[in-house]
Amino acid sequence: MTTRFTRRTFLRGAATVPLAKFLLGCGDDNSGDGGQVDAGIDAPDGPSPPMVFDHGVASGDPTPTALIIWTRISLASAPVEVIWELSTDDFSTIAMMGTVMTDADRDYTVKVDVTGLTPGTTYQYRFKASGETSRAGRAKVPVMGPLDAMKIGVTSCSSLAHGYFHAYRSLAGEEVDVVLHLGDYIYEYGNLEYGEIRMYEPPTEILSLSDYRTRYAQYRRDADLQEVHARHAFIVVWDDHEVANDANEDGAENHMPGTEGSYAARRAAAFQAHREWMPIRDGEPGKIYRKLAFGDLVDLFMLDTRHFGRDMPIPNIEDPNRQLLGAEQEEWLAAELPASTAAWKFIGQQVMMGQLPLLMNNDAWDGYPAARTRFLDLIETSDVDDVVVLTGDIHSSWGMDLTRDPQNTSTYDPATGMGSLAVELVTPGITSPGLPDAIAPDLNLEILSMNRHMKHVDVALRGYMLLDVNRTRVRASYRHWNDLQIIEPTFVEGTVGATLEVQAGTPRLIKVS
């Protein structure tokens, strides 16, 4: 089999399948109400009351003493005072409370950075406004100091037009400490441009601040997405579709200045809507790279490989001065990563770091080899151990060793890990398509046969990844849905996929099952 694919044909490959006869939801209500089937998950507070809290609740960026809590006052037309409450006992007593105002300038979203929390505690939170009380959310803040184990959910790429968010509802029922979302939380396309299972609001490609706000509002009415936000704190970064496909610092493949106006204005609007609608701690506008700590077990470095300092793709990828992270972000990582004393250092980022010549994916680190070399240099020269790179973007599941030249048998041995400096684990899309199920088995085997550093590949199935972390190993397992399951409006249970493991002190992946 000698098939070659570009990134575009890979990420849009499922569009070649004749799906029309399987369509079950075209033109249906886009709120995701079909996902409200019980699915075995207890929801003690029921759905959000209509009109006032129609977009649910969320939390994010937990630290040992602080947590972002979020909601929105739906359909408000004047400034609104909102009461927030935290509890550790289902609101029999109130641990903390306060008030905050919201108005049209922030699209009536409410985001509170609650401080003074007790490390290692699970909190419930809720909001009150206009005579109504929101559903309750819950979130766990990390411990400060020794930590022996934790669990993390990892997600990316949720194209509403390609299906239903069964994976989000399943993840809501997992016992995880936090969820990482590695980007493409929304998609910018109009109806029938990329996917045809559910229709978008607005129906056209989103360009303005009002457009981006409307698209986030549609996503956040989805019952399955509301459920996972209510159950777990999120740590998010954006990828390209939060603005436009294949974006860089100065433009995007899916932005046409002649007909769509200023890219800078579009990006500013997209960034503002993201800041309003996501439970991310506010900092300098446009700068989302940051570090979060989970005791002494995990330091999590969340990067921006898409918008902050990324050079435009060019034919001369070997230029040593080309940037993927940008000089400022590189300098920050070069200072923070070697200083980490955590058992594990996780790098949460968007695009695949490991080499993938088969797909000619120059949108990823393959298109910025000098930047990848500088990252590997940082690990090697600073003697940083136990680094795990976590990746989204490519709508498929991968596990690989990170080495300078996977094909060089004198400098890299996949059996022993000699020459591997870190490992990479790639999570599939929640709904966004990889390649069709029918061709996946052969292509999976072909990719593995051509790439010595890869231990697992699945180019078709959707879903998410679970990380089970302790002081001696990180174990990654996949939950998967196939092409037909993802377009079923009622909840469908996923299947358990492969399990991969990296052991402390040995930077190589092992396929456990």
Image: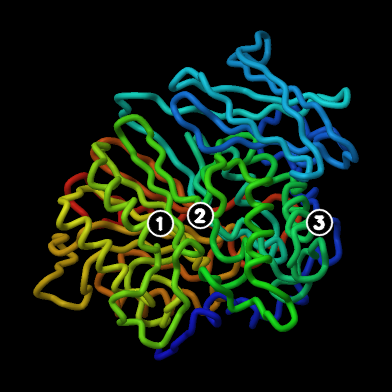
- First in sequence: mark 3 or mark 2? 3
- First in sequence: mark 1 or mark 3? 3
Note whether 439 is above or below 67 in the view shown: below
Instruction: Write the residue at 36% across / 86% down.
Output: 316
The part of the image, by quadrant, that contains residue 93 is: top right
Give the residue number, with chain letter if any, for mark 1. 498
Note whether 50 is above or below 244 in the view shown: above
Q: Locate residue 308 relative to residue 462 in the image: left or right.
A: left
**Which mark, by number, is residue 30?**
3
Question: What is the three-letter code of the residue carrying label 2?
Answer: Leu
Mark 1–mark 3 distance (CA, rounded to whole Å): 32 Å
Q: Locate residue 268 relative to residue 414 in the image: left or right.
A: right
How packed mark 2 is, by other alpha carbons closer than 10 Å (few <14, some 14-19, many 20 or more), is many
Residue located farthest toward the left when viewing the structure as drawn: 410
Depth check, front residue: 274 or 364: 274
Mark 3–mark 2 distance (CA, rounded to whole Å): 23 Å
Note whether 104 is above or below 12 in the view shown: above
Question: What is the three-letter code of the residue carrying label 1?
Answer: Ala
User: Decide: marks 3, 2 in contact (CB < 8 A)?
Assistant: no
User: Decide: marks 1, 2 in contact (CB < 8 A)?
Assistant: no
Image quadrant occupied by the C terminus? bottom left
Q: Nearer the viewer, mark 1 or mark 3?
A: 3
Q: Position of residue 301 (x, y in %)?
A: 38, 47
Instruction: Write the residue at 35% across / 62% down.
Output: 327
Q: Locate residue 251 relative to residue 467 in the image: left or right.
A: right
Q: Position of residue 508 (x, y in %)?
A: 23, 57
Q: Nearer the viewer, mark 3 or mark 2?
A: 2
Q: Nearer the viewer, mark 1 or mark 2?
A: 2
Depth check, front residue: 132 or 482: 132
**Which mark, by number, is residue 182?**
2
How packed mark 3 is, by other alpha carbons closer than 10 Å (few <14, some 14-19, many 20 or more), is many
How packed mark 1 is, by other alpha carbons closer than 10 Å (few <14, some 14-19, many 20 or more), is some
